[in-house]
Image (cartoon, grey):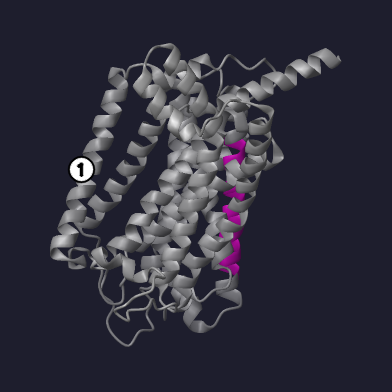
């Protein structure tokens, strides 16, 4: 939070999680729930008919499934990196945005985890990729990208969920105590079980802070490993434009606007939907907007490096593949939406809530188009020994994409409904620090 004014009381944050759901909340749950039903129908149809319901073909053996998978991983990585850096640097912005940034990262990685399993064709046999002692002799093939997906996604889910959960423990204890004082014993027990007997002693705080910073430090190498796994999946194919050592860094740099754009849009939703303007104040929103603009610059540099490398240093086949991508609109729209559009936030007059949401969501959508350009346009190149069939996503693929986005929204709504959307213990810690500074003066 901004240090211009003292932090407000955390009672309003706890009240937002304990009070009955209003009509706006029910409407949001209804819309997101409808999308989750669409997801369930799309998955059921996929299991019944097979992956032939998708529009994939030769040479487009991947389509929306890989695009969405790489995109959701990028959203999760950017949100996790943002939250982890704030925790490690103990920046004041962490009190306002860390909690829902961590929740967005966890929801995004869960949405990403759907795609590798569903793309198996027989997802009920997903356990074949697990490193278990098999009496059937079906040992996991460690040269398979499916096994790489298992290790990448499982590590991402584990570390991201730990990062989110460890930060929640003191606030869960606060909700437990408030619910008990109101006589809601069942709710108090529901909060008390994951609070792990937290009593706020000096020993508890010491262990919590050490664990929280340790898990935050684990997030940083996780980001490199997760994006490296995705890049390796591209590299082992026969597509010329995918054999690039720059791809892991490219995915990280171009994925930053997607995660920060969604975090910025969520910040606006919290300010107005849960009336938390005192916690996510104008200074926090301005800083978030400028961070999104800086992320746009990083993405622009990655695209410039991609273009320069492909046109000046690579072989003819790779250069032709990149030129085909440039001939399509997806690459250019991605550069404009995720790289150039956020630069508007350097002007203070444009940093307004009504502008934050569309630009944030467009920045995230632009990254999705960059993945489209790489997965679809990057395959449609002239130097192939057979006619290239155009890729057209089917209705099932659109339903799965919409459903995964609805699942993401539904998970965040559940988080905002039952858990504190702003870190109460970090806010109280900031209050104590300001009191000490005033006493020293």
Q: Is residue 52 above or below residue 272?
A: below
* Residue found at the far bottom of this picture: 385
Residue 11 falls inside the magenta stretch: no
Which sits in the foreground, 328 or 306? 306
Crowding around mark 1 (Cα neighbors within 10 Å: few <14, some 14 to 19, many 20+) is some
Q: Is residue 207 above or below residue 439?
A: below
* Residue found at the far right of this picture: 441
**What secondary structure do most residues of the magenta stretch adopt?**
helix
Q: Judge from the rendering whether residue 278 lies leftward or rightward of residue 52; answer left or right.
A: right
Rendering coords of residue 188 (x, y %): 41, 22
Q: Quadrant of the N terminus?
A: top right
Q: Is residue 384 visible?
A: yes
Which sits in the foreground, 163 or 133? 133
Callout 1: helix, strand or loop?
A: helix
Rendering coords of residue 306 (x, y %): 56, 66
Rendering coords of residue 365 (x, y %): 41, 48
Q: Residue at x 58, y 41 (%)?
A: 83
Which image quadrant is residue 395 in?
bottom left
Instruction: Identify the magenta region.
Output: 289-308
Which sits in the foreground, 10 or 194? 194
The residue pinned by badge 1 equals 37
Q: Is residue 247 above or below residue 6?
A: below
Q: Residue at x 58, y 47 (%)?
A: 81
Q: Is residue 330 visible?
A: no
Q: Judge from the rendering whether residue 325 lies leftward or rightward of residue 218; answer left or right.
A: left
Q: Residue at x 32, y 79 (%)?
A: 138
Q: Judge from the rendering whether residue 29 lies leftward or rightward of residue 395; answer left or right.
A: right
């Amino acid at each position: 939070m901004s240090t211009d004014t003292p932090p407000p009381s955390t009672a309003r944050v706890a009240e937002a999680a304990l009070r009955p759901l209003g009509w706006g909340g029910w409407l949001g749950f209804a819309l997101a729930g409808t999308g989750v039903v669409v997801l369930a129908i799309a998955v059921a149809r996929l299991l019944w008919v097979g992956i032939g319901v998708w529009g994939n073909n030769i040479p487009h053996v991947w389509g929306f499934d890989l695009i969405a998978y790489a995109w959701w991983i990028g959203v999760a990585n950017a949100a996790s990196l943002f939250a982890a850096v704030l925790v490690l640097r103990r920046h004041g912005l962490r009190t306002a945005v860390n909690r829902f940034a961590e929740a967005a990262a966890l929801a995004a990685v869960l949405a990403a985890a759907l795609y590798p399993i569903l793309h198996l064709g027989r997802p009920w046999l997903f356990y074949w990729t697990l490193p278990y002692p098999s009496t059937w002799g079906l040992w996991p093939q460690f040269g398979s990208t499916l096994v790489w997906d298992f290790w990448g996604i499982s590590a991402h889910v584990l570390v991201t969920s730990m990062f989110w959960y460890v930060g929640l423990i003191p606030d869960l204890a606060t909700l437990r105590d408030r619910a008990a004082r109101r006589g809601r014993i069942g709710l108090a027990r529901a909060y008390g079980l994951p609070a792990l007997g937290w009593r706020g002693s000096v020993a508890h705080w010491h262990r919590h802070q050490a664990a929280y910073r340790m898990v935050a430090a684990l997030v940083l190498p996780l980001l490199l490993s997760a994006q490296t796994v995705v890049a390796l999946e591209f590299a082992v194919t026969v597509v010329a434009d995918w054999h690039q050592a720059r791809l892991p860094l490219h995915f990280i740099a171009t994925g930053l606007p997607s995660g920060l754009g969604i975090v910025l849009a969520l910040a606006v939703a919290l300010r107005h939907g849960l009336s938390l303007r005192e916690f996510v104040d104008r200074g926090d929103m301005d800083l978030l907007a400028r961070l999104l603009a800086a992320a746009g610059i990083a993405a622009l540099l990655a695209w410039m490096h991609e273009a320069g490398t492909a046109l000046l240093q690579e072989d003819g086949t790779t250069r032709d593949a990149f030129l085909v991508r440039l001939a399509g609109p997806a690459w250019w729209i991605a550069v404009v939406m995720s790289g150039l559009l956020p630069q508007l936030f350097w002007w203070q007059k444009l940093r307004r809530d009504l502008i934050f949401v569309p630009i944030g969501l467009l920045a995230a959508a632009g990254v999705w188009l960059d993945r489209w350009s790489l997965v679809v346009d990057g395959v449609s190149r002239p130097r192939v020994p057979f006619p290239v069939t155009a890729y057209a996503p089917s209705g099932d693929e659109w339903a799965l994409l919409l459903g995964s986005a609805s699942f993401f929204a539904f998970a965040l709504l559940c988080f905002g409904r039952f858990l504190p959307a702003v870190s109460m213990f970090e806010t109280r810690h900031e209050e104590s620090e300001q009191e000490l500074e005033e006493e020293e003066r």
